[in-house]
Image (cartoon, rainbow, N blue to C red):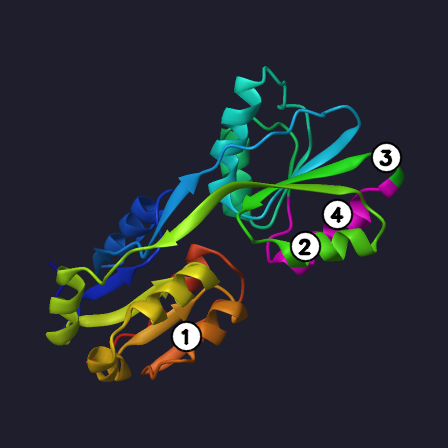
Amino acid sequence: MSKKNKPYLVITRPEPGLSETAQKVAQLGWQPLLMPVMTIHSLPFEYSDMDGLQAIIFTSRQAIIPTIQHFIKQHITFQHIPAFTVGDITAQDAKQAGFVHVISAGKDAVTLAELITRQLSPDKGKLFFPSALEQGQLLVELVQQSGFNIVQRAAYKTESILKLPDEFTSQLQAKAINSILFFSSETARFFVELVPTELQHYFQSIQAIGISPKAKKYLEHMSWRSIEIAAHPNTEEMLCLLKEHF
């Protein structure tokens, strides 16, 4: 058990990523409280027109497994197709899934669009973008503005949990939570929507750590001890922002 007076760090992300983040948190001497605020559901989609496909785009690691499952079901060889990813962790997952040529933007959708337009050419073929349902519009617009033909399919959808878990509420009221980690703007949005009015004052002594400025926009709807945003969108940068509070 951590010796810190406020020992708990809350991790709001789902798997994949939840367990590995909990391990890193524990190694730093904190007590991880696992509280994914959303569930992931794969969606069936149709896409088999691989002729002339120039690259596949992943803005979320959640899209990789449903896409691979689709390719296998359709007997499509995908390993040789270049995969462009929004960040390094997503790139690692793409490599583990079998993609040989993986290029990471290392930041956000805008940086990813810039990378694609810099390294690829519209006349070399279309792009395939499996994403979350009703997500990814910014990337699509940016790439289309550069003349690319991008085909988007919804590979998964996210749903908020129905209520905050009792364990979280108990530790919140006991004032045992130091920080809460938000690994996407969606987890930040779902979390803020889940917090009842009567519990909001407890967060004035808690540090919120977000992965992006977009996550911060949702977190600002509540009063926190502080809101910190990672300089680069990865776990290590987020954990570097931890500030112990007594």
Q: Choose the circle earlier in sequence order: 4 or 2.
A: 4
- Report the amino acid beneath label 2: Leu
Task: Please name the residue shown 64% across and 51% down the image.
Answer: 105
SS for callout 2: helix
Which one is closest to the eye, mark 4 or mark 1? 1
- Report the amino acid beneath label 3: Lys
Q: Choose the circle earlier in sequence order: 1 or 2.
A: 2
- The foreground one among 110 and 72 is 72
Give residue 90's position: percent from left, percent from top: 52, 44
Asked whether the viewer can see residue 111, the reply is yes
Q: Is residue 65 magenta?
A: no
Location of mark 2 (residue): 139
Location of mark 3 (residue): 124
Crowd tier of the residue under label 2, counting other residues whose Cα lies within 10 Å: few below 14, some 14–19, many 20 or above: many
Q: Choose the circle earlier in sequence order: 3 or 2.
A: 3
Location of mark 4 (residue): 116
Crowd tier of the residue under label 4, counting other residues whose Cα lies within 10 Å: few below 14, some 14–19, many 20 or above: many
- Report the amino acid beneath label 4: Ile
Crowd tier of the residue under label 3, counting other residues whose Cα lies within 10 Å: few below 14, some 14–19, many 20 or above: few
Location of mark 1 (residue): 219
Segment colored magenta:
104-122
| Most common SS among magenta residues | helix
Q: Are marks 1 and 2 in contact (CB under 8 Å)?
A: no
Question: Marks 1 and 2, how far apart in space?
Answer: 23 Å
Crowd tier of the residue under label 1, counting other residues whose Cα lies within 10 Å: few below 14, some 14–19, many 20 or above: many
Q: Choose the circle earlier in sequence order: 4 or 3.
A: 4
Give residue 1's position: percent from left, percent from top: 10, 58
Q: Choose the circle earlier in sequence order: 3 or 1.
A: 3
Residue 201, disc: none
Question: Marks 3 and 2, how far apart in space?
Answer: 19 Å
Which one is closest to the eye, mark 4 or mark 2? 2
